[in-house]
Image (cartoon, rainbow, N blue to C red):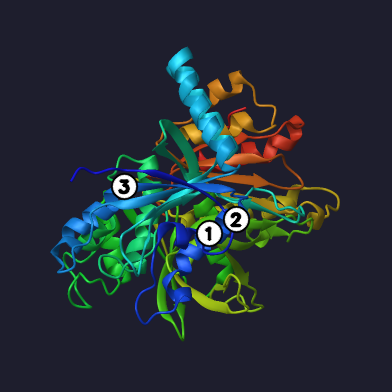
Amino acid sequence: MPIKPEILWHSFGAKDCLKNALQIRAVPFQSESDSFLQLRYIEQYAADLNCECFAIETHYIDRDYIEDHSAFYSKSLNPYPNFCKRVHFFAGDVGVVAQRLTDAVRQGTTTGIEAYRAACRKFSADHYLGFAVIKPLQGTPVGRTVMKCYPSESSDGTYRRRFCCTKEYVAHFHGCELTVSGLAFQQQDIGVSACATTALWSALQKTADAEPIAAMTPVQITQYATRYSLPSGRPMPSEGLNIGQMCSAVQATGASPNLFRVEGNHRQARIILRTAILSGFAPVLALHNPMLGGHAVTAVGLKETVSSTEPDVHFHEHVVTGIYLHDDRLGPNLKCTFRESPNPDDSLGLDVQLRDSPTIEQWELRYILVPMHPKIRLSFADLESISSLVLQTLLAIHKVHVKGKIEVKEAPIGFDCRVLRAHHFLERLIVEDNGIDPEHLERIGKAVAPARYLGVIRVSGPFFSQFDLVVDTTGTLTNPNYLGVIPTEEAEPGMKAIGRLIALITKCPFVE
């Protein structure tokens, strides 16, 4: 029989509206709360974004699921379908949304392709909240899901959210090209993927956005990870991956696995997490809980408090109070807070508050795995080490040469470390209110070697003007290659003396 795809519109309302609209049944002998945990989380998340209606595509071919079906489900006795459903979420009621979609298509038929695309983007900005693929798997229905992130500013102004590990996804629906910015999430199915595979799949979505590597499906990640090592037996059904297998899978994609072993020192773990996320790399976190065992999640954003008090010397890690996680057991953009510890040698603790429950899961961070370009040889920890060396020089200069008493507590020495694509570094300078003009940018382009990725250490302090120390990421900590020192704020000439001295020490140009 020929396939007859349909689009079914629904108003977004009471609890379980997704389950009822999709006509999904719970797994036998399993409670509905366990069967639909991720689906209900997505429903509640959509409600947080003020969703008012949703539409269901009844026949959708998803690349990730079709690969899983070919490798695993097609070989089962049960005849699993090879197609999915896809749910689109919208702000606005059904009538308004449907009319706006029709208007966008009509605009294209009357005024051309550019006007049509502009209308699609305007509709997406005003109404589109994301989509969720629903797999024909009764026990694990939530497939590739991309939801719009929470707003950057909190409603009360006490903290801000920074979702830097996202990309733009395109969904074609009702004749329109819809766009949403987020990072793909899906539920692990145990058959093809467990938590580590799913976390890597999400992280590699972001890596593939920046580099020409293949966007791997879960079954491909599992196959690459278990090609040479099977400590838990057969690769599928998946029993999970160890750290070595996860690194092997990243290496097989053409990316490079940068692994940080978190052995105590929760402060350094915070610095590395902040630096990686603000650099736009989605880190995979290997966690451990005494009762639940090991687990892997993907970090997609930061929660930073708006604080007026800062330590004397800082890497801005003190403002990061939590992160947002893709946890395949629960849902996307999950809120997670750092567990404070007075002992600096303690490992970083993560507290996950389960939605609609007083239960708090307490996890300990064991590893941070960041898929990166293979030519980035300087790690985030290396950038911190270079910053510490610069700090020693600044404190020595302050002690010997600066006259008069300076209250460092009121204007602390700060370091902000990132790894940026060269054009993103220039874009950052352009959009900031720093007095940099086109001629200055031209001088930077002529003086600084055009590396693909740059290590950028922004240094600020009370007795000198802010500057960026730019480091070649293809070098190493023992043999560093400094590319330039660039002042990033307007200041009196005398305040730039420290930047010039750092340029002299590192034997690189001072570009102003």
Residue position marked by numbered label 2 in the rendering: 47
Q: Are marks 1 and 2 in contact (CB under 8 Å)?
A: yes
Q: Nearer the viewer, residue 128 or 192?
A: 128
- Residue drawn 27% across and 75% down? 239
Q: Nearer the viewer, residue 357 or 194?
A: 357
- Residue drawn 78% across and 48% down? 402
Q: Secondary structure at mark 1?
A: helix
Task: Count all numbered tags in the image, as a single digit.
Answer: 3
Q: Nearer the viewer, residue 310 or 18?
A: 18
Q: Label 1 crowding class (10 Å Cα cut-off): few <14, some 14-19, many 20+? A: many
Residue lying at the far bottom in this picture: please name it. Answer: 291
Q: Label 3 crowding class (10 Å Cα cut-off): few <14, some 14-19, many 20+? A: some
The answer to whether 363 is drawn above or below residue 54 in the figure is below
Label 1, label 2: how many angstroms apart (C-alpha)? 6 Å
Image quarter in which the C terminus is found: top right
Instruction: Pinpoint residue 328: horizontal percent, then vertical percent.
Output: 42, 65
**Residue 268 can be seen, yes or no:** yes
Label 1, label 3: how many angstroms apart (C-alpha)? 21 Å
Instruction: Pinpoint residue 307: horizontal percent, then vertical percent.
Output: 76, 57
Going by the image, does 46 lie left or right of 227? Answer: right
The answer to whether 369 is drawn above or below residue 447 in the figure is below
The answer to whether 476 is drawn above or below residue 187 in the figure is above
Residue position marked by numbered label 3 in the rendering: 59
Query: Residue 255 got which mark?
Result: none
The answer to whether 242 is drawn above or below residue 435 in the figure is below
Instruction: Pinpoint residue 490: horizontal percent, then vertical percent.
Output: 73, 31
Which tag is nearer the camera, tag 2 or tag 3? 3
Res. 28 image quadrant = bottom left
- What's the residue type where badge 3 is placed? His
- What's the residue type where badge 1 is placed? Glu
Q: Earlier in the sequence, mark 1 or mark 3?
A: 1
